[in-house]
Image (cartoon, grey):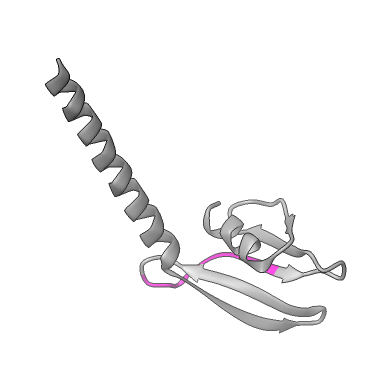
Amino acid sequence: MSHLTLDNQALAQLELSTYLAQQSSDTAHYEIDSTDDIFGKLYRVWGGQLGINCFGTFYQNLDGFWVSQPCCIDERQQWRTSDEAVAAIVNA
C-alpha cells in the first residue's frame, strides 16, 4: 500500500511540475506595444504562437490607476501597477 501512495505522490508532483512549466511558458510569450491615443498612451498585449493575437489593452487613468481590458471580457478593472494590469490580461 505504501508503494501505491508513493506512486500517486510522484504522479501528482509530475503533474504539478508540468502544469507550472506550461503556465510559465504560456505567460512568457507575450509582447507589449503602445499607440498614442487622444488621452495618452494605450498599451496592447500581444501573444500566441505567432505573437499576432491581441490579448487586451491597458492604460493609466487620471487617478494613477492602471485600467485593463482583456479582449474576451467587456468589463474593465483597475490596478495599482501596470504589472497587475498585464497579469489580468494574460491570465483572462
Task: Please determine whether, in this image, residue 21 is positioned above or below residue 11.
Answer: below
What quarter of the picture does the N terminus occupy? top left
58 sits left or right of 23 in the view: right
| Residue 89, image quadrant | bottom right
* Position of residue 28 measured from the top left corner of the image (x, y, whole percent): 42, 66
| In the rendered image, the vertical position of residue 23 relative to residue 29, given as above or below | above
Q: Return the residue nearer the eye: 58 or 16.
A: 16
Outermost residue toward the bottom?
Answer: 36
Which image quarter: residue 42? bottom right
| Above or below, 66 relative to 4 | below
- Residue depicted at x 27% and y 34%: 12
Q: Position of residue 44 (x, y in %)?
A: 60, 72
> In this view of the protein, which residue sits in the foreground, 20 or 89?
20
Q: Which residues are magenta?
A: 50-58
Tell me which secondary structure the magenta stretch mostly adopts.
strand
Q: Nearer the viewer, residue 74 or 82?
A: 82
Towards the viewer: 29 or 7? 7
Residue 34 at x, y percent in the picture: 63, 81
- Residue displayed at 81% across by 82% down: 38
Name the side, left or right, on which 91 lies relative to 59. Answer: left
x 22%, y 35%: residue: 11
Task: Name the outermost residue toward the right.
Answer: 63
- Which residue sits furthest top? 1
Percent coordinates x, y for residue 71 in the rendering: 60, 59
